[in-house]
Each structure stands twice: as C-alpha cells, then as structure tokens.
Amino acid sequence: FLAHVNEAGEVLERELSGLLAPFIGGVVVEQRGTGLLRGVQLSSDPSRLIELARDRGLLLVAAANNTIRLVPPLNTSFADIKKGAAIIGDCVKQLASEQTTA
C-alpha cells in the first residue's frame, strides 16, 4: 500500500510539473508539497480556478489567499491522478487566457 502511495505522489508531482511549467511566473507562482499533499500557489485569488475545476467535475480546496490545496485519497488510481492533473492544467490554461484578454 505504501509503495502505491509513494508512486502516486511521484505521478502527481510529475504530471503537475509538466502541465504547470508554461504558466510559472504568470498565473502560477509555484507548485509545492510532498507526496500526495500538494499546493499550487497562484498569482491571484483561486476562486475562478476552483470554479472552472468544479465545472469539469474536480473539487479543489482553497488554502490561504492564493493557493489551491490538493489532497487526493491515498488509494487514488494513477489514471485518476492524471485525469485530475489534466483538469487542473486545462483550468490554468483557461485562467491564463482570461487574464490575458481582460
């Protein structure tokens, strides 16, 4: 079980890093955390990102003023981790687009 949890944390970090890298220094300030407990700090209030994710079926939690907290269940499948990360990536991309046109 612990091996799965450790590998799941690595999958989450790898997926988020790849998807968020183009937005570091813009919409995204940084990704931090360890294992499955992750935070994505944004350059603005996370409410819009949380709304976009919810519309796509992913529930996110705000932490502090500009951060979303990710705490998936320890038994989450790798496929679900990748799907969730992809949703976050799509939402960040949309948020960046909205901020560019605003």
Image (tube, grey):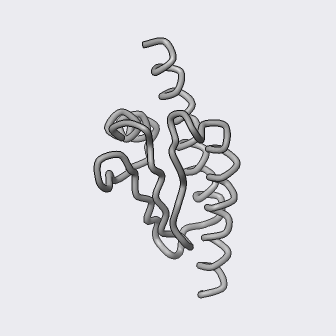
Q: Residue at x 63, y 70 (%)?
A: 8
Residue 91 visible somewhere in the drawing: no
Q: Relative to 58, is 34 above or below?
A: below
Q: Residue at x 57, y 38 (%)?
A: 25
Q: Nearer the viewer, residue 12 or 30?
A: 30
**Quadrant of image for the C terminus:** top left
Residue 60 visible somewhere in the drawing: yes
> Looking at the picture, how far across and down is residue 79, in whole percent?
65, 58
**Quadrant of image for the N terminus:** bottom right
Q: Nearer the viewer, residue 23 or 69?
A: 23
Q: Relative to 38, is 65 above or below?
A: above
State left or right for residue 61 relative to residue 36. Answer: left
State left or right for residue 66 relative to residue 87. Answer: left
Q: Residue at x 53, y 21 (%)?
A: 97
Residue, far bottom: 2
> Looking at the picture, how far across and down is residue 65, in whole percent?
29, 47
Total number of numbered discs in the rendering: 0
Residue, far top: 101
Q: Residue at x 59, y 41 (%)?
A: 24
Question: Image quadrant of residue 57?
Answer: top left
> Looking at the picture, how far across and down is residue 72, in whole percent?
46, 65
> Looking at the picture, how far across and down is residue 81, in whole percent?
59, 59
